[in-house]
Image (cartoon, helix red, strand yellow):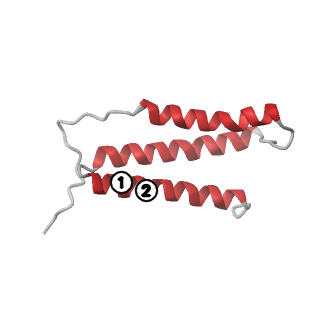
Amino acid sequence: MMTLNTAPNPKRRLRLHPMLWLGAALLLAFPALAMVMSAEVRWGPEDFAVFALLLAGLCAGIEAALHLFETPRWRIGAGLMAVLIFLTIWAHLAVDLFD
């Protein structure tokens, strides 16, 4: 029987993945660039704040998946769960479900 080891390895330090966070920052920059190039995109400061929080949550979820789980199968599953949660919240916000 296979057991799930979710305890972090004390010998393994928490290592952040800078390319993941840089990618999130670039995703946050795309709407700002679109606002400069087109009048159709109109984001306010609150839109950028919510998107930044969503991206930070996504990156934190992926970092947690990479740190907590040792087998690739569990890491991929937890990473996909973080992505699905991000996309679900993003889709709900896009259609004003939370207003």
Tag of residue 80: 2
Decide which of 8, 25 is in the foreground and name it: 25
Q: Is residue 52 positioned above or below 99 on the image? A: above
Left or right: residue 95 versus residue 58 is: right
Q: Is residue 6 positioned above or below 10 on the image? A: below
Find numbered disc 2 in the image and state the secondary structure of the residue it sits on. Answer: helix
In the current view of this chain or complex, which residue is farthest to the left? 1
Q: Are marks 1 and 2 in contact (CB under 8 Å)?
A: yes
The type of residue carrying mark 1 is Ile
Name the residue beneath numbered marker 1: 76
Q: Residue at x 45, y 32 (%)?
A: 19
On the image, the x and y values in percent for residue 94 come to: 71, 57
The type of residue carrying mark 2 is Leu
On the image, the x and y values in percent for residue 52 come to: 60, 40
Q: Residue at x 33, y 45 (%)?
A: 66
Q: Residue at x 87, y 39 (%)?
A: 39
Mark 1 nearby-residue class (10 Å; few <14, some 14–19, many ≥20):
some
Left or right: residue 43 versus residue 24 is: right
In the current view of this chain or complex, which residue is farthest to the front? 37
In the current view of this chain or complex, which residue is farthest to the bottom? 1
Tag of residue 15: none
Which quarter of the figure is the N terminus placed in? bottom left
Find numbered disc 1 in the image and state the secondary structure of the residue it sits on. Answer: helix
